[in-house]
Amino acid sequence: MKSKYWLLALLLFMGCSEEPKALTVGVRVGNIAPEIKAEDASGVKMELSQYKGKVVLLSFWASWCGPCKELLPYEKQLVKQFEGKPFVLLGVNSDIDKTALVKAQQQFGMTWPSFWDGLGSINREWDIEFLPMLILIDERGIIRFNSKTIMDDINSFKDLADKIEREIQKVLNKVVVEKK
């Protein structure tokens, strides 16, 4: 009889000894988002980690990018829709000249800050192959969505905006549930 208990104890111990998989820093869904440190349009230093605790939508864009401009009304709508919730939209701007970033923010009424990536180092680190690119990060800093993975299935920017809205809501719902 004792041997059965020893066997059971051994099996339980072995089952409990498996450690959970460690999260790694990277740019794929499920990875911890790499840190971004850069200046905004005004020259103020920004860090992605200062937004930990909020759901962050990174929008990689440039003033010369036509599709980026087409996405702007939907981004404005998202900012308005999720106002008052733990959500923030942050741009990552690829213009070589910072004055183009400033001018675009004013011209298009962009109310959210943008990291300025004039040298392209952020885009390289984040493996950005085309613009616009949207990446959703949860409140713990884990990447939950990357628009690169669905672009073949998207027929319009409205489709993309609808998809990202659902993804944001899903992550926000989880945040609210965990806080209760």
Image: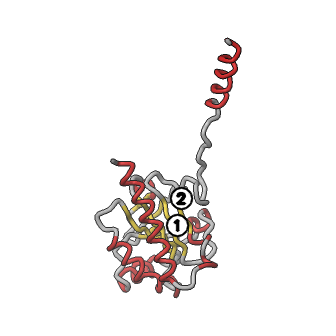
What residue is shown at x 46% (from left), y 76% (from top)?
162
Q: Which residue is mark 2?
A: 143
Image location (x, y in percent) of residue 177: 38, 52
Residue 107, compared with residue 27, is above or below; it is below
Displayed quadrant of residue 111: bottom left
Image location (x, y in percent) of residue 114: 43, 70
Q: Residues within 10 Å of mark 1 (few under 14, many from 20)?
A: many
What residue is shown at x 56% (from left), y 78% (from top)?
131
What residue is shown at x 63% (from left), y 27% (from top)?
12
Task: Please report contact status of discs 1 and 2: CB closer than 8 Å, yes or no.
Answer: yes
Question: Element at badge 1?
Answer: strand
Per the rendering, the mark at residue 59 is: none
State the quadrant of the N terminus. Answer: top right
Residue 151, compared with residue 39, is above or below; it is below
Per the rendering, the mark at residue 135 is: 1
Of 81 and 140, the residue lying toward us: 81
Image location (x, y in percent) of residue 66: 52, 87
Mark 2 belongs to which amino acid? Ile
Mark 1 belongs to which amino acid? Ile
Residue 101, compared with residue 56, is above or below; it is below
